[in-house]
Image (cartoon, grey):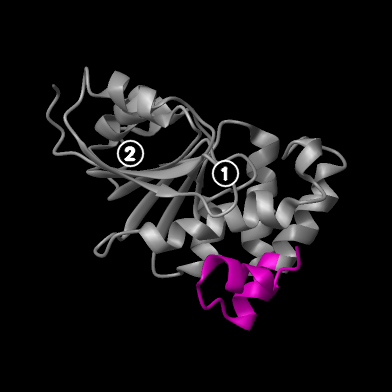
């Protein structure tokens, strides 16, 4: 997939300047991948679709009024760093415990002039430091665990990539948490969804 296809496949108007940032990000990803494992080797050739478009598609579902976002276990920066490029008005926190991955994130942030806050810590260690409007996460944990992270941040909203077993995860999570949810079909993965959850922080 060519980078320009992100605009057509996502249905979003991505500016030329932003596409250039994403291209630079992609080049750095391939360069660093040679020495550290940032993404699965099986997704390298299709990184534009598997990682960049997969991140871009979240843009449609970020609700109005969100100003601060925490990307949990961001790894190579998907989806949080991509969202920061697309929405420079957002204050995005990238939380990652791996030092080498954090160095990569710092390099991309610097070389693409993308403002993010990178926290090299375990997720639970950042609860007392952050209060965010929205928590996002990709291939990180099951929904009950993610709801626990939302509770830790006192975040009222979450937006997560989920596979075909997402309904089972919802059932499990509702045993402990009160929340509303919407499931939106993934633009790139059949039987996968973007799961949007809202909660008032009251446990079930």
User: Is residue 115 something one can see in this rendering?
Assistant: no
Outermost residue on the front side: it is 191
> Where residue 129 sits in the image (x, y, percent)?
33, 38
Q: Is 81 left or right of 129, judged from the image as shown? A: right
Q: Which residue is mark 1?
A: 190
> Where residue 145 sits in the image (x, y, percent)?
37, 23
* Disc nearest the viewer among 2 and 1: 1
Q: Is residue 3 above or below residue 53?
A: below
Q: Residue at (81%, 37%) from the top-left corner?
A: 41
Which residues, given as a range, are shown in magenta?
Answer: 1-22
| Crowd band around label 2 with a 10 angstrom C-alpha radius: few (<14), some (14–19), many (20+) | few
> Where residue 36 sits in the image (x, y, percent)?
80, 36
Residue 180 colored magenta? no
Q: Which residue is mark 2?
A: 129
User: Is residue 94 something one can see in this rendering?
Assistant: yes
The residue lying toward the viewer, choosing from 110 and 62, is: 62
Outermost residue on the right side: it is 34
């Amino acid at each position: 997939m060519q980078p320009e296809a992100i605009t057509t496949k996502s249905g979003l108007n991505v500016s030329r300047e932003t596409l250039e940032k994403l291209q630079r990000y992609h080049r750095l990803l391939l360069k660093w991948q040679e020495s550290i494992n940032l993404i699965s080797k099986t997704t390298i050739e299709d990184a534009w679709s598997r990682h960049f478009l997969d991140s871009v598609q979240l843009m449609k579902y970020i609700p109005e009024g969100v100003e601060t976002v925490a990307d949990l276990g961001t790894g190579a920066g998907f989806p949080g760093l991509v969202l920061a490029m697309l929405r420079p008005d957002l204050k995005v926190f990238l939380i990652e415990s791996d030092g080498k991955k954090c160095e990569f994130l710092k390099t991309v942030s610097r070389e693409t002039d993308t403002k993010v806050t990178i926290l090299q810590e375990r997720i639970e260690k950042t609860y007392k430091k952050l209060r965010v409007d929205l928590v996002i996460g990709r291939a990180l944990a099951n929904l009950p665990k993610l709801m626990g992270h939302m509770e830790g941040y006192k975040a009222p909203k979450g937006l997560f990539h989920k596979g075909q077993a997402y309904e089972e995860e919802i059932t499990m999570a509702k045993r402990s948490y009160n929340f509303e949810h919407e499931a939106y079909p993934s633009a790139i993965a059949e039987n996968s969804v973007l799961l949007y959850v809202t909660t008032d922080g009251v446990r079930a």
